[in-house]
Every structure is written in C-alpha cells, then in structure tokens.
Image (tube, rainbow, N blue to C red):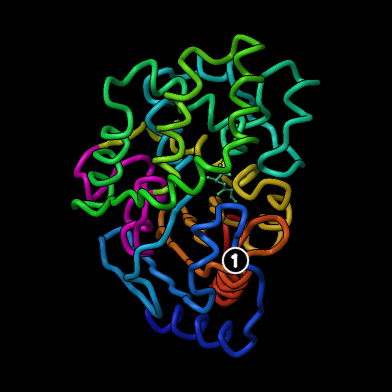
C-alpha cells in the first residue's frame, strides 16, 4: 500500500471540497489560530512516517491528551479504575454537567471532561510530579523530546474555567475526587495546552495500533488486553455526542480535541493524526473527519 499517495489524494480531495467550520473560541487563545491549516501524518508499524500539508506544525492537542493520561492511569489502577469512571458513551456535550448529577458523580466515560478530571485526579494521587510525568511519557511514546506546553493557552483556559471547576467540585461532592481541585485543574489545563505536530501525535498513538507495544519507546506500554480496551473506548466515546457518527463514517478508534486534531488507529496497520482547527458544532474538526472518512473509503476497510 502506497500510504504517501493515499494521504496526498485524500488531502487534495478535502481541499477541493473545502468544508468549513469554526475555530474554537471558548478558549480565547485558540481563536487566534489560522483555520486554514491542515495536515495529515500516517505512521506505519515499521515506523515510516508519511505526511502531507501542515503535518509538522505543532498545534494544541487539547482532549487528545486524555488518551495519554488514561493509558498512564489504567496501567496503574487496572480494572479498579472502572469503579470511579464508567465505559459508556455519554450522548452529551463534552463539558455537560447534568448527567453527572443524576448518575451520582460517576462520569459516563474517561473522555468527557468529567471523566478526564477523574483520570487526572487519579494521576495526581499516584505521581509526584504529574505534569512532568505526562510530558515524559508522551515524549517517550513519540521517540524524542517533542512536548511543549503553551502557557498562553493554559492561562486562557484558566481564565474561563467555570465549567471544569464546577465539574471538579461536583465530583468532590460525590467523593469521587481525592486531591485539591485547583491542583488537579492545573495539571489538566497543562495537559490540554500541550502542542505537538501530527507526526509526533501519530507516533504517540502507535502502541495502540500495535497491541500495546511502542516501537518508538522500544517497550510494551500496556498489555494487549489494555490496548484493546482503550481502543474500544475511543471507538465508542472518542468524539463525545458524535461518536456514533464517527464510527459510522470512519470506523476507526480515535480521539478528537478542540484544537482541531484527531488521532486514530487502524489496529495492526498504522496510526494517523489529522489536524485542521475549524470545528463543527460538536467540537470536532470538520476537515479531519472528512479526511479520515475518505481514507477508510479509499482503503476499503476500517475496523469492520
Ligand atoms: O477542558 C476543555 O474544555 C478543553 N481543554 C478540552 C476540550 C476538548 O478538547 C474537547 N474536544 N473535543
């Protein structure tokens, strides 16, 4: 399979159609990003990188980081983790508060904001220097020092932290939050403000295409059974209330972020990261979804 030709064809078709969305502005610093940027990087299981467009430009990975933190925490807590966070699609916006109340402080899944805050709280309970360890982990998965945290993006989100702060206190009210709210939010906003290129992001997801073994870190990151479960969660919950549609149109486990990035995996074949900052009303990148849909259509296979 000529992956370079494939992603170039996909890139050209998406650019010709030019579907548009709106750059996230609820984090004001993200509103300044040029919405015309668009890149694709595909990494095969031999470590070959294929790229097109702005695939080497670092961007704000935002919620894609929730896969990295889930991986760290799942590895430590194993199945005990699922007493604190569920594994069901939420069918609600990523920052919804309502469901958390009627489900008594157990978030639907680790990828909505409430669930990700529980994961970061668990991480803070087990790791001495949580954000350093998150950065080290992602650097290791990508095979080199690539993680940068953008302090302006972090500050911008901290200035508008009402919903995430409310979610954290709600979790605390239900005794599902161990650490100080401001300490956990500090780590959470830092992880969301990480910037990486499509290439490095795709590399950091490679272990999920490879039964838990990272060829860039040269070690097993998680067991094959954990890798399968993280992929199942990405397939069912990786796109919030658009997860069903992504599974229907693309058919790959993946995770989106409001920076416009999507990382996805084709188990036993490759990992891929696509980035274009303009989002649809669900907070997912319009061009990135279109590109992945064309990719699996042209390949004539997905998970299914
Ligand atoms: O907490 C937030 O709202 C953002 N830092 C992350 C949200 C996000 O990326 C959701 N993605 N689609």
Q: Is residue 15 or residue 271 the one in the foreground?
A: 15
Give the position of the C terminus as an image quadrant: bottom right
Q: Position of residue 130 (x, y in %)?
A: 32, 28
Residue 129 higher or lower than 56, as above or below: above
Magenta span of residues: 194-219
Residue 269 position within the rendered picture, expressed as x and y whole percent measured from the top left: 41, 59
36, 227: nearer the viewer = 36
Q: Which residue is mark 1?
A: 23
In the picture shown, does residue 230 fall above or below 264? above
Tell whether 191 sits left or right of 34.
left
Can you say whether 194 is above or below 4 in the image?
Answer: above
Residue positioned most to the bottom: 16
Q: Residue at x 66, y 71 (%)?
A: 21
Going 57% across and 77% down the picture, which residue do you hit? 298
Residue lying furthest top: 175
Helix, strand or loop status at disc 1 = strand
Residue 206 in sight from this viewpoint = no
Residue in the image at 40% along x and 35% along y: 224
Q: Is mark 1 within 8 Å of ligand 1?
A: no
Can residue 4 be seen by looking at this rendering? yes
Total numbered circles: 1
Residue 87 image point, x, y percent: 63, 30
Q: Check residue 217 for magenta coloring.
A: yes
Badge 1 crowding class, 10 Å Cα cut-off, few under 14, some 14 to 19, many 20 or more, is many
Please identify the quarter of the rendering in which residue 164 is found.
top right
Left or right of 135 in this view: 183? right
Which quadrant of the view contains residue 160?
A: top right
Query: In this view of the protein, which residue sits in the foreground, 4 or 12?
Result: 12
Screen quadrant of the N terminus: bottom left
Q: Residue at x 63, y 35 (%)?
A: 162
Is residue 24 in the magenta section?
no
Q: Residue 112 at x, y = what percent?
A: 62, 38
């Amino acid at each position: 399979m000529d992956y370079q030709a494939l992603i170039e064809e996909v890139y050209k078709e998406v650019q010709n159609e030019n579907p548009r969305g709106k750059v996230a502005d609820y984090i004001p610093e993200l509103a300044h990003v040029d919405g015309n940027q668009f890149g694709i990087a595909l990494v095969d299981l031999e470590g070959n990188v294929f790229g097109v467009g702005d695939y080497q430009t670092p961007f704000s990975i935002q919620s894609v980081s929730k896969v990295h933190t889930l991986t760290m925490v799942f590895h430590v807590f194993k199945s005990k983790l699922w007493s604190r966070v569920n594994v069901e699609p939420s069918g609600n916006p990523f920052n919804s508060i309502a469901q958390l109340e009627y489900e008594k402080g157990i978030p639907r899944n680790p990828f909505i904001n409430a669930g990700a805050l529980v994961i970061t709280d668990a991480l803070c309970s087990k790791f001495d220097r949580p954000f350093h360890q998150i950065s080290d982990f992602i650097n290791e998965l990508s095979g080199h020092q690539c993680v940068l945290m953008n302090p302006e993006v972090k500050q911008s989100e901290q200035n508008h932290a009402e919903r995430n702060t409310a979610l954290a206190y709600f979790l605390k009210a239900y005794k599902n939050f161990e650490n100080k709210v401001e300490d956990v939010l500090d780590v959470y906003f830092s992880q969301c403000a990480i910037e990486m290129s499509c290439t490095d992001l795709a590399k950091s997801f490679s272990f999920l295409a490879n039964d838990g073994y990272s060829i860039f870190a040269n070690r097993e990151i998680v067991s094959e059974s954990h890798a399968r479960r993280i992929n199942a969660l990405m397939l069912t919950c990786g796109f919030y209330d658009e997860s069903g549609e992504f599974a229907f149109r693309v058919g790959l486990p993946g995770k989106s972020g409001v920076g416009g990035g999507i990382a996805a995996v084709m188990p036993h074949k490759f990992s891929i990261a696509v980035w274009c900052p303009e989002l649809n009303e669900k907070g997912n990148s319009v061009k990135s979804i279109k590109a992945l849909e064309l990719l699996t259509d042209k390949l004539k296979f997905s998970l299914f």
